[in-house]
Amino acid sequence: MAQLQPVRGTHDILPDDFARFRHVVDTARHAASLFGYREMATPIFEFTEVFARSMGETSDVVSKEMYSFTDKGGEGLTLRPEYTAGICRAFISNGLQQHVPLKTFAWGPMFRFERPQKGRQRQFHQIDIEVIGSAEPQADAEVIGVAAEILRRLGILDKCVLELNTLGDPESRSGYRDALVAYFSGHLARLSEDSRRRLEKNPLRILDSKDEGDRALVADAPLIDDYLTPHARDFFAAVKDGLGAAGVPFTVNPRLVRGLDYYTHTAFEFTTTMLGAQGTVLAGGRYDGLIEQLGGKPTPGIGWAGGIERLVLLSDPQPVPAPMVALVPIGAAAEAAAVTLAGELRRADIAVELAYGGNAGKRFKRADRLGCVAAVVIGDDELARGAVVLKDLKSGTQTELPRADLVARLKA
């Protein structure tokens, strides 16, 4: 029988790796809570229309990458490729308009059918931040500030560069769109097939093209800065001022765009040179038109998502876990007493390893393999005296003490 392997583009997160994975999630959750963001979750699958309407039928994600299927009831469903659309759907279907601005933190698995690469899998995991119901540029600066604080706490911020741009308001985008159509129409023969199709639907997506020929044309394409309205300029200036006040450095990248029509104003990415071709650590932008596009009332929003696997690759080593104590009972009576003692220690928040069987030698070897710092030995003599033997597994020294003093001694 062939050796069983995970499906291509998926991977097992084993206990040693999961400690770093959990560290990223816990750090992000705590940092977000300091800004007043509350955790929520949406289903792993949604009606396909949620993503098709939000991301656009012609986007690469919808047309090429989504895991979609028809369930036994005949419904078209899709495993979520990103979090924002589901959170906006939840905002509408749960009537959360009275809670604006709604500030949320979420994390979980996402699914996209694409070529597996370092830090990018077909099942991957993201942390996600959203603010729904705030049109002020201060919200943009805060959302980016949350990202910077998470990266700082993970020891990553100095490995990243914040790239920032504005997409302007709808009036700005309309003028810019016309300029892009005029420019790329003059180079139609040099455009890739995908970009010729995008030219009709949404020319801003050409600016995201990975095709080398397209990228050469993009280098000389018009910049949106020449088409910004006074309002859009003022909004972008306020975002930059907010980042300056928060001490978050950035560089303006005039080629940074979001191609979908509901994106407005701020677009940003934290990038790094330490992940090879996959340089984006986390990215986001303002999506003031998305909730209306999904069928809700016009409601502004801004958010970002970051890949947990990439953050794990970049982050500092996981801090050493809390020390564990091994219980080593000797004899049948001690076995029962050890179960009782293990419960007492765990209720006192002391991590305990109690093997299911084996002699003392095997139990000590397991304790050493697990990295336990101490062992508590209980035999018939200790039971009779109401005592235990506490052994330091690093120095090898051991001390007998009353069982009643064990919790205080271990915590000390």
Image: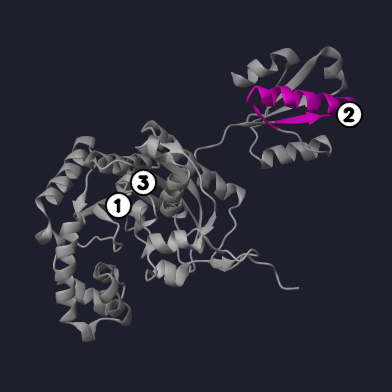
Give the magenta part as a residue range. Answer: 326-352
Of labels 3 and 2, the one closer to you = 3
Q: Is residue 317 visible?
A: no
The residue that label 2 is drawn on is: 331
Q: Which mark is residue 220?
A: none
Colour option used: one colour
Q: Which mark is residue 156?
A: 3
**What residue type is disc 3 on?**
Ile
Q: Is residue 77 visible?
A: yes
Looking at the image, tell me whether mark 2 or mark 1 is earlier in sequence order: 1
Mark-to-mark CA distance, 3 and 1: 21 Å
Mark-to-mark CA distance, 2 and 1: 64 Å
Q: Is residue 388 magenta?
A: no
**What residue type is disc 2 on?**
Gly
Mark-to-mark CA distance, 3 and 2: 51 Å
Name the spot of residue 252 as percent of width and height, x first. 18, 54
Q: Is residue 273 left or right of residue 41?
A: left
The residue that label 1 is drawn on is: 285
Work out whether 117 lies above or below 253.
Answer: below
Residue that appears at 11% across and 60% down: 227
Q: The N terminus lies in which quarter of the figure?
A: bottom right
